[in-house]
Image (tube, helix red, strand yellow):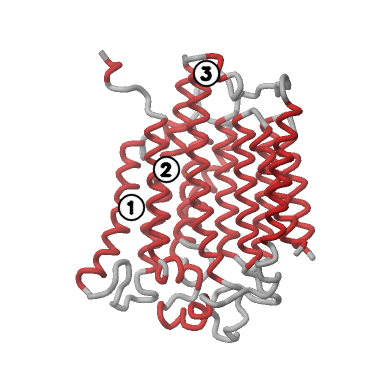
Amino acid sequence: MEIHLILIFMICAALFAAETKDLISSLIALSVAGLGLCLAFLILKAPNLAITQLVVEIIYVIILIRATIDKDLPLVRDGRWLFNTVSAMLFAIVFLSFAYFALKEIPVFGQPLMRVSNEYVTSGLEKTGSANIVSAITLNFRSFDALAEAAVLFTAIIGVLAITRKTGKIDEK
Amino acid sequence: MKNKEAPGMSLIVKSVTRLTAGLILIYGIYIVFRGHIGPGGGFAGGVIIALSLVHLMLAFGKDVVLKRLDEARGIIISSLGALAFLILGIVGFLGFKAPFLKERFEHFSAGLIPIYDVVIGVLVSSGLFITFLALVLLTGKREKK
Amino acid sequence: MSLYFLCLILFCIGLYCVLRKRNIIKIIVGVGIIEYAVNLLLILIGYRQNGRAPISANDQEILNMVDPLPQAMVLTTIVIGLAVMVILVALALRIYEKHGTFDITKIRRLKG
Protein backbone atom coordinates (compact mmCIF):
# COMPACT_ATOMS: atom_id res chain seq x y z
CA MET A 1 0.00 0.00 0.00
CA GLU A 2 2.85 2.42 0.76
CA ILE A 3 4.30 1.61 -2.62
CA HIS A 4 1.16 2.95 -4.32
CA LEU A 5 1.47 6.24 -2.44
CA ILE A 6 5.14 6.60 -3.29
CA LEU A 7 4.49 5.83 -6.95
CA ILE A 8 1.73 8.45 -7.15
CA PHE A 9 4.08 10.93 -5.47
CA MET A 10 6.76 10.13 -8.05
CA ILE A 11 4.27 10.58 -10.89
CA CYS A 12 3.28 14.02 -9.57
CA ALA A 13 6.93 15.05 -9.27
CA ALA A 14 7.64 13.81 -12.80
CA LEU A 15 4.65 15.72 -14.21
CA PHE A 16 5.85 18.88 -12.49
CA ALA A 17 9.37 18.33 -13.82
CA ALA A 18 8.03 17.89 -17.33
CA GLU A 19 5.66 20.83 -17.36
CA THR A 20 7.22 23.68 -15.39
CA LYS A 21 8.86 26.53 -17.26
CA ASP A 22 11.74 27.17 -14.92
CA LEU A 23 14.78 24.98 -15.53
CA ILE A 24 16.08 25.02 -11.95
CA SER A 25 12.75 23.97 -10.46
CA SER A 26 12.49 21.25 -13.10
CA LEU A 27 15.82 19.83 -11.97
CA ILE A 28 14.79 19.98 -8.31
CA ALA A 29 11.55 18.16 -9.14
CA LEU A 30 13.62 15.47 -10.88
CA SER A 31 15.65 15.04 -7.71
CA VAL A 32 12.43 14.80 -5.67
CA ALA A 33 11.33 11.92 -7.91
CA GLY A 34 14.72 10.30 -7.32
CA LEU A 35 14.29 10.55 -3.55
CA GLY A 36 10.91 8.87 -3.92
CA LEU A 37 12.64 6.08 -5.81
CA CYS A 38 15.15 5.78 -2.96
CA LEU A 39 12.29 5.38 -0.46
CA ALA A 40 10.66 2.78 -2.70
CA PHE A 41 13.91 0.79 -2.78
CA LEU A 42 14.03 0.88 1.02
CA ILE A 43 10.48 -0.44 1.33
CA LEU A 44 11.09 -3.12 -1.31
CA LYS A 45 14.02 -4.47 0.77
CA ALA A 46 16.92 -3.35 -1.38
CA PRO A 47 19.24 -1.31 0.89
CA ASN A 48 22.22 -1.52 -1.49
CA LEU A 49 20.26 0.17 -4.23
CA ALA A 50 18.86 2.77 -1.84
CA ILE A 51 22.35 3.96 -0.87
CA THR A 52 23.53 4.02 -4.47
CA GLN A 53 20.42 5.82 -5.74
CA LEU A 54 20.63 8.50 -3.04
CA VAL A 55 24.26 9.24 -3.76
CA VAL A 56 23.90 9.21 -7.55
CA GLU A 57 20.90 11.53 -7.22
CA ILE A 58 23.00 14.18 -5.46
CA ILE A 59 25.67 14.08 -8.15
CA TYR A 60 23.01 14.38 -10.90
CA VAL A 61 21.65 17.54 -9.30
CA ILE A 62 25.07 19.10 -8.77
CA ILE A 63 26.20 18.45 -12.34
CA LEU A 64 22.93 19.54 -13.96
CA ILE A 65 22.57 22.74 -11.90
CA ARG A 66 26.19 23.63 -12.53
CA ALA A 67 25.53 23.15 -16.22
CA THR A 68 22.45 25.37 -16.39
CA ILE A 69 23.22 27.96 -13.74
CA ASP A 70 23.05 31.07 -15.89
CA LYS A 71 21.44 29.83 -19.07
CA ASP A 72 17.78 30.02 -18.16
CA LEU A 73 15.82 30.79 -21.29
CA PRO A 74 12.08 31.17 -21.68
CA LEU A 75 10.13 28.38 -23.26
CA VAL A 76 9.32 29.12 -26.88
CA ARG A 77 5.97 27.95 -28.16
CA ASP A 78 5.68 28.59 -31.85
CA GLY A 79 4.86 26.26 -34.69
CA ARG A 80 3.58 22.73 -34.52
CA TRP A 81 2.98 22.09 -30.85
CA LEU A 82 -0.34 20.38 -31.63
CA PHE A 83 1.35 17.92 -33.98
CA ASN A 84 4.09 17.19 -31.44
CA THR A 85 1.61 16.60 -28.63
CA VAL A 86 -0.56 14.31 -30.73
CA SER A 87 2.39 12.23 -31.89
CA ALA A 88 3.68 11.89 -28.32
CA MET A 89 0.23 10.75 -27.14
CA LEU A 90 0.12 8.25 -30.00
CA PHE A 91 3.46 6.77 -28.97
CA ALA A 92 2.24 6.47 -25.38
CA ILE A 93 -0.99 4.73 -26.44
CA VAL A 94 0.86 2.22 -28.65
CA PHE A 95 3.32 1.52 -25.86
CA LEU A 96 0.62 0.98 -23.24
CA SER A 97 -1.39 -1.35 -25.46
CA PHE A 98 1.68 -3.51 -26.11
CA ALA A 99 2.48 -3.43 -22.40
CA TYR A 100 -1.00 -4.70 -21.56
CA PHE A 101 -0.28 -7.96 -23.38
CA ALA A 102 3.23 -8.19 -22.00
CA LEU A 103 2.11 -7.76 -18.39
CA LYS A 104 0.23 -11.06 -18.47
CA GLU A 105 3.51 -12.98 -18.69
CA ILE A 106 5.18 -11.23 -15.77
CA PRO A 107 4.86 -13.06 -12.40
CA VAL A 108 2.35 -11.69 -9.89
CA PHE A 109 3.57 -9.04 -7.47
CA GLY A 110 4.91 -10.70 -4.33
CA GLN A 111 5.72 -14.12 -5.76
CA PRO A 112 8.96 -13.98 -7.77
CA LEU A 113 10.37 -16.70 -9.97
CA MET A 114 13.46 -17.87 -8.12
CA ARG A 115 14.68 -20.36 -10.72
CA VAL A 116 18.18 -18.94 -11.10
CA SER A 117 18.70 -17.19 -7.82
CA ASN A 118 17.76 -20.11 -5.55
CA GLU A 119 21.29 -21.38 -6.08
CA TYR A 120 22.77 -17.99 -5.18
CA VAL A 121 20.65 -17.57 -2.06
CA THR A 122 21.21 -21.04 -0.61
CA SER A 123 24.92 -21.42 -1.29
CA GLY A 124 26.11 -17.84 -1.57
CA LEU A 125 27.53 -17.53 1.91
CA GLU A 126 29.67 -20.63 2.04
CA LYS A 127 30.89 -20.41 -1.56
CA THR A 128 32.06 -16.81 -1.49
CA GLY A 129 32.24 -15.88 2.17
CA SER A 130 30.31 -12.67 1.60
CA ALA A 131 27.23 -12.03 3.73
CA ASN A 132 25.86 -9.52 1.26
CA ILE A 133 24.37 -11.67 -1.50
CA VAL A 134 24.10 -8.81 -3.99
CA SER A 135 27.81 -8.03 -3.92
CA ALA A 136 28.53 -11.77 -4.00
CA ILE A 137 26.57 -11.94 -7.26
CA THR A 138 28.12 -8.87 -8.89
CA LEU A 139 31.69 -9.57 -7.84
CA ASN A 140 31.95 -13.35 -7.75
CA PHE A 141 29.21 -15.28 -9.54
CA ARG A 142 28.81 -12.79 -12.37
CA SER A 143 32.11 -10.93 -12.37
CA PHE A 144 31.93 -10.08 -16.04
CA ASP A 145 29.09 -7.79 -15.08
CA ALA A 146 31.35 -5.74 -12.84
CA LEU A 147 34.08 -5.79 -15.47
CA ALA A 148 31.76 -4.41 -18.15
CA GLU A 149 30.39 -1.84 -15.70
CA ALA A 150 33.87 -0.55 -14.93
CA ALA A 151 34.65 -0.50 -18.66
CA VAL A 152 31.51 1.54 -19.45
CA LEU A 153 32.21 4.06 -16.69
CA PHE A 154 35.85 4.44 -17.74
CA THR A 155 34.86 4.93 -21.37
CA ALA A 156 32.36 7.61 -20.33
CA ILE A 157 35.03 9.47 -18.35
CA ILE A 158 37.44 9.40 -21.29
CA GLY A 159 34.60 10.51 -23.57
CA VAL A 160 33.80 13.53 -21.40
CA LEU A 161 37.46 14.50 -21.27
CA ALA A 162 37.63 14.23 -25.07
CA ILE A 163 34.44 16.25 -25.64
CA THR A 164 35.40 19.08 -23.31
CA ARG A 165 38.96 19.33 -24.53
CA LYS A 166 40.10 22.90 -24.87
CA THR A 167 41.77 23.35 -28.24
CA GLY A 168 43.37 21.12 -30.78
CA LYS A 169 47.10 21.23 -31.24
CA ILE A 170 46.86 22.59 -34.78
CA ASP A 171 45.28 25.82 -33.56
CA GLU A 172 48.36 26.72 -31.54
CA LYS A 173 50.41 28.12 -34.39
CA MET B 1 41.55 34.01 4.36
CA LYS B 2 41.49 37.60 5.59
CA ASN B 3 41.68 39.44 2.28
CA LYS B 4 38.47 40.28 0.49
CA GLU B 5 39.32 38.71 -2.86
CA ALA B 6 39.42 35.18 -1.46
CA PRO B 7 37.49 32.89 -3.84
CA GLY B 8 34.62 30.70 -2.76
CA MET B 9 31.63 31.25 -0.53
CA SER B 10 31.19 33.13 2.75
CA LEU B 11 32.92 32.53 6.07
CA ILE B 12 30.08 30.44 7.53
CA VAL B 13 30.16 27.98 4.65
CA LYS B 14 33.93 27.71 4.86
CA SER B 15 33.89 27.02 8.60
CA VAL B 16 31.25 24.33 8.31
CA THR B 17 33.03 22.77 5.33
CA ARG B 18 36.27 22.56 7.28
CA LEU B 19 34.44 20.42 9.84
CA THR B 20 32.37 18.20 7.57
CA ALA B 21 34.52 17.44 4.51
CA GLY B 22 36.82 15.09 6.42
CA LEU B 23 33.88 13.29 8.00
CA ILE B 24 32.29 12.72 4.59
CA LEU B 25 35.59 11.37 3.26
CA ILE B 26 35.91 8.93 6.18
CA TYR B 27 32.30 7.79 5.72
CA GLY B 28 33.00 7.09 2.05
CA ILE B 29 36.01 4.94 2.93
CA TYR B 30 33.89 3.09 5.51
CA ILE B 31 31.20 2.36 2.89
CA VAL B 32 33.87 1.05 0.50
CA PHE B 33 35.34 -1.34 3.04
CA ARG B 34 32.10 -2.83 4.32
CA GLY B 35 30.77 -3.87 0.91
CA HIS B 36 30.89 -7.59 1.70
CA ILE B 37 29.18 -7.60 5.09
CA GLY B 38 26.43 -5.05 4.71
CA PRO B 39 24.83 -2.61 2.32
CA GLY B 40 27.39 -0.54 0.51
CA GLY B 41 30.02 -1.33 -2.03
CA GLY B 42 32.71 0.14 -4.19
CA PHE B 43 30.54 2.29 -6.42
CA ALA B 44 28.51 4.04 -3.70
CA GLY B 45 31.60 4.67 -1.56
CA GLY B 46 33.54 6.01 -4.51
CA VAL B 47 30.77 8.47 -5.32
CA ILE B 48 30.74 9.64 -1.69
CA ILE B 49 34.51 10.26 -1.78
CA ALA B 50 34.11 12.22 -5.02
CA LEU B 51 31.29 14.23 -3.42
CA SER B 52 33.52 15.22 -0.50
CA LEU B 53 36.07 16.61 -2.96
CA VAL B 54 33.29 18.41 -4.85
CA HIS B 55 32.07 19.87 -1.54
CA LEU B 56 35.53 21.20 -0.78
CA MET B 57 35.77 22.68 -4.25
CA LEU B 58 32.36 24.40 -4.13
CA ALA B 59 33.19 26.05 -0.81
CA PHE B 60 36.81 27.11 -1.28
CA GLY B 61 37.06 27.74 -5.00
CA LYS B 62 38.83 25.55 -7.49
CA ASP B 63 42.42 26.52 -6.81
CA VAL B 64 42.55 24.80 -3.43
CA VAL B 65 41.62 21.43 -4.88
CA LEU B 66 43.49 21.82 -8.15
CA LYS B 67 46.77 22.07 -6.22
CA ARG B 68 46.28 18.54 -4.90
CA LEU B 69 44.43 16.69 -7.68
CA ASP B 70 44.34 18.11 -11.16
CA GLU B 71 43.15 16.56 -14.39
CA ALA B 72 46.42 14.94 -15.46
CA ARG B 73 46.96 13.29 -12.08
CA GLY B 74 43.33 12.23 -11.76
CA ILE B 75 43.20 10.42 -15.08
CA ILE B 76 46.38 8.51 -14.13
CA ILE B 77 44.82 7.37 -10.82
CA SER B 78 41.59 6.39 -12.53
CA SER B 79 43.45 4.39 -15.19
CA LEU B 80 45.45 2.61 -12.50
CA GLY B 81 42.17 1.58 -10.86
CA ALA B 82 40.79 0.16 -14.10
CA LEU B 83 44.06 -1.65 -14.84
CA ALA B 84 44.25 -3.15 -11.36
CA PHE B 85 40.76 -4.64 -11.79
CA LEU B 86 41.94 -6.49 -14.89
CA ILE B 87 45.22 -7.60 -13.30
CA LEU B 88 43.37 -9.01 -10.28
CA GLY B 89 41.25 -11.02 -12.67
CA ILE B 90 44.27 -12.38 -14.49
CA VAL B 91 46.07 -13.34 -11.26
CA GLY B 92 43.52 -15.99 -10.44
CA PHE B 93 43.50 -17.08 -14.08
CA LEU B 94 47.23 -17.68 -14.43
CA GLY B 95 48.65 -18.86 -11.17
CA PHE B 96 45.89 -20.75 -9.44
CA LYS B 97 44.12 -22.71 -12.20
CA ALA B 98 40.81 -20.94 -11.70
CA PRO B 99 38.55 -19.29 -14.31
CA PHE B 100 39.05 -15.67 -15.31
CA LEU B 101 38.00 -13.21 -12.56
CA LYS B 102 37.64 -16.00 -9.95
CA GLU B 103 40.05 -16.93 -7.22
CA ARG B 104 40.98 -20.16 -5.54
CA PHE B 105 42.96 -18.85 -2.58
CA GLU B 106 41.32 -18.04 0.72
CA HIS B 107 41.81 -14.48 1.90
CA PHE B 108 40.96 -13.01 5.24
CA SER B 109 37.22 -12.63 4.93
CA ALA B 110 35.61 -12.96 1.54
CA GLY B 111 38.18 -13.83 -1.08
CA LEU B 112 38.84 -11.05 -3.55
CA ILE B 113 35.57 -9.17 -3.02
CA PRO B 114 36.90 -6.41 -0.67
CA ILE B 115 39.90 -5.85 -2.94
CA TYR B 116 37.66 -5.50 -5.98
CA ASP B 117 35.59 -3.01 -3.98
CA VAL B 118 38.66 -0.90 -3.16
CA VAL B 119 39.78 -0.92 -6.80
CA ILE B 120 36.35 0.12 -8.08
CA GLY B 121 36.24 2.84 -5.42
CA VAL B 122 39.54 4.31 -6.62
CA LEU B 123 38.35 4.25 -10.25
CA VAL B 124 34.96 5.82 -9.54
CA SER B 125 36.08 8.53 -7.10
CA SER B 126 38.91 10.02 -9.14
CA GLY B 127 37.05 9.54 -12.42
CA LEU B 128 33.86 11.30 -11.31
CA PHE B 129 35.81 14.13 -9.74
CA ILE B 130 37.77 14.88 -12.89
CA THR B 131 34.54 14.65 -14.91
CA PHE B 132 33.01 17.34 -12.69
CA LEU B 133 36.21 19.36 -13.00
CA ALA B 134 36.15 19.17 -16.80
CA LEU B 135 32.51 20.34 -16.97
CA VAL B 136 33.14 23.25 -14.58
CA LEU B 137 36.30 24.36 -16.37
CA LEU B 138 34.46 24.30 -19.70
CA THR B 139 31.76 26.61 -18.33
CA GLY B 140 34.32 28.94 -16.76
CA LYS B 141 36.25 29.27 -20.00
CA ARG B 142 33.09 30.24 -21.85
CA GLU B 143 32.20 32.91 -19.32
CA LYS B 144 35.62 34.50 -19.59
CA LYS B 145 35.25 35.20 -23.28
CA MET C 1 -0.93 -5.50 -11.43
CA SER C 2 -1.87 -1.90 -10.67
CA LEU C 3 1.68 -1.25 -9.47
CA TYR C 4 3.11 -2.31 -12.82
CA PHE C 5 0.59 -0.07 -14.55
CA LEU C 6 1.56 2.98 -12.45
CA CYS C 7 5.18 2.26 -13.29
CA LEU C 8 4.35 2.27 -17.00
CA ILE C 9 2.54 5.59 -16.63
CA LEU C 10 5.74 7.02 -15.15
CA PHE C 11 7.58 5.67 -18.21
CA CYS C 12 5.06 7.37 -20.50
CA ILE C 13 5.57 10.73 -18.77
CA GLY C 14 9.28 10.44 -19.47
CA LEU C 15 8.58 9.48 -23.09
CA TYR C 16 6.28 12.50 -23.48
CA CYS C 17 8.98 14.74 -22.03
CA VAL C 18 11.58 13.43 -24.46
CA LEU C 19 9.36 13.64 -27.55
CA ARG C 20 7.55 16.89 -26.89
CA LYS C 21 9.98 19.30 -25.24
CA ARG C 22 12.44 21.44 -27.12
CA ASN C 23 14.93 22.38 -24.44
CA ILE C 24 17.89 20.01 -24.28
CA ILE C 25 17.94 20.08 -20.47
CA LYS C 26 14.26 19.05 -20.47
CA ILE C 27 15.14 16.14 -22.74
CA ILE C 28 17.86 15.06 -20.29
CA VAL C 29 15.28 15.24 -17.47
CA GLY C 30 13.00 12.98 -19.51
CA VAL C 31 15.77 10.42 -19.98
CA GLY C 32 16.27 10.42 -16.22
CA ILE C 33 12.57 9.77 -15.56
CA ILE C 34 12.57 6.84 -18.01
CA GLU C 35 15.56 5.37 -16.21
CA TYR C 36 13.79 5.60 -12.83
CA ALA C 37 10.69 3.85 -14.18
CA VAL C 38 12.66 0.95 -15.64
CA ASN C 39 14.70 0.46 -12.47
CA LEU C 40 11.58 0.43 -10.30
CA LEU C 41 9.80 -2.07 -12.58
CA LEU C 42 12.73 -4.50 -12.38
CA ILE C 43 12.81 -4.30 -8.59
CA LEU C 44 9.03 -4.73 -8.30
CA ILE C 45 9.22 -8.00 -10.24
CA GLY C 46 11.71 -9.46 -7.78
CA TYR C 47 9.85 -8.57 -4.58
CA ARG C 48 8.57 -11.31 -2.28
CA GLN C 49 5.69 -10.73 0.12
CA ASN C 50 6.97 -10.35 3.70
CA GLY C 51 10.48 -11.08 2.53
CA ARG C 52 13.70 -9.71 3.93
CA ALA C 53 16.76 -8.03 2.50
CA PRO C 54 19.32 -10.30 0.79
CA ILE C 55 21.93 -10.12 3.53
CA SER C 56 22.72 -13.32 5.40
CA ALA C 57 22.43 -13.42 9.17
CA ASN C 58 22.87 -16.23 11.66
CA ASP C 59 19.55 -16.16 13.46
CA GLN C 60 17.21 -16.05 10.49
CA GLU C 61 16.15 -18.66 8.01
CA ILE C 62 17.39 -18.35 4.50
CA LEU C 63 14.50 -19.08 2.22
CA ASN C 64 12.34 -15.96 2.53
CA MET C 65 14.76 -13.53 0.92
CA VAL C 66 13.68 -11.28 -1.92
CA ASP C 67 15.16 -12.09 -5.32
CA PRO C 68 18.77 -10.79 -5.34
CA LEU C 69 19.40 -11.14 -9.07
CA PRO C 70 17.37 -8.08 -10.26
CA GLN C 71 19.06 -6.01 -7.58
CA ALA C 72 22.47 -6.89 -9.00
CA MET C 73 21.28 -6.04 -12.50
CA VAL C 74 19.80 -2.69 -11.38
CA LEU C 75 23.06 -1.82 -9.63
CA THR C 76 24.75 -2.07 -13.03
CA THR C 77 21.92 -0.09 -14.64
CA ILE C 78 22.33 2.85 -12.25
CA VAL C 79 26.04 3.08 -13.09
CA ILE C 80 25.35 3.03 -16.82
CA GLY C 81 22.65 5.69 -16.35
CA LEU C 82 25.16 7.94 -14.60
CA ALA C 83 27.64 7.47 -17.46
CA VAL C 84 24.98 8.30 -20.08
CA MET C 85 23.87 11.37 -18.13
CA VAL C 86 27.41 12.74 -17.85
CA ILE C 87 28.00 12.32 -21.59
CA LEU C 88 24.68 14.02 -22.40
CA VAL C 89 25.48 17.02 -20.20
CA ALA C 90 28.91 17.40 -21.81
CA LEU C 91 27.35 17.33 -25.30
CA ALA C 92 24.70 19.88 -24.27
CA LEU C 93 27.35 22.25 -22.94
CA ARG C 94 29.29 21.94 -26.17
CA ILE C 95 26.15 22.72 -28.19
CA TYR C 96 25.49 25.78 -26.04
CA GLU C 97 29.04 26.97 -26.51
CA LYS C 98 28.88 26.59 -30.29
CA HIS C 99 25.33 27.76 -31.06
CA GLY C 100 24.41 29.92 -28.08
CA THR C 101 21.07 28.23 -27.35
CA PHE C 102 19.49 25.11 -25.87
CA ASP C 103 16.53 25.10 -28.27
CA ILE C 104 16.78 22.18 -30.65
CA THR C 105 14.80 23.87 -33.41
CA LYS C 106 17.10 26.91 -33.48
CA ILE C 107 20.25 24.87 -33.85
CA ARG C 108 19.54 24.01 -37.45
CA ARG C 109 19.22 27.60 -38.56
CA LEU C 110 22.31 29.03 -36.97
CA LYS C 111 24.89 27.05 -38.97
CA GLY C 112 28.09 27.25 -37.00
Question: Residue drawn 70% across and 55% down?
Answer: C7
Picture layout, residue A110 above or below residue A159? below
Residue position for label 2: A156
The verdict on a common chain for dots 3 and 2 is no
Q: Residues within 10 Å of mark 2 (few under 14, many from 20)?
A: many
Q: Quadrant of the N terminus of chain C?
A: bottom right
Cα distance, mark 3 to mark 2?
24 Å
Q: Position of residue B23 (x, y in %)?
A: 51, 53
Kindly identify the amino acid type of the residue bearing the numbered disc 2. Answer: Ala
The label shown at residue B82 is 1
The label shown at residue C99 is 3
The verdict on a common chain for dots 3 and 1 is no
Picture layout, residue B128 above or below residue C92? below
Kindly identify the amino acid type of the residue bearing the numbered disc 3. Answer: His
Question: Residue drawn 59% across and 37% down?
Answer: C28
The verdict on a common chain for dots 2 and 1 is no
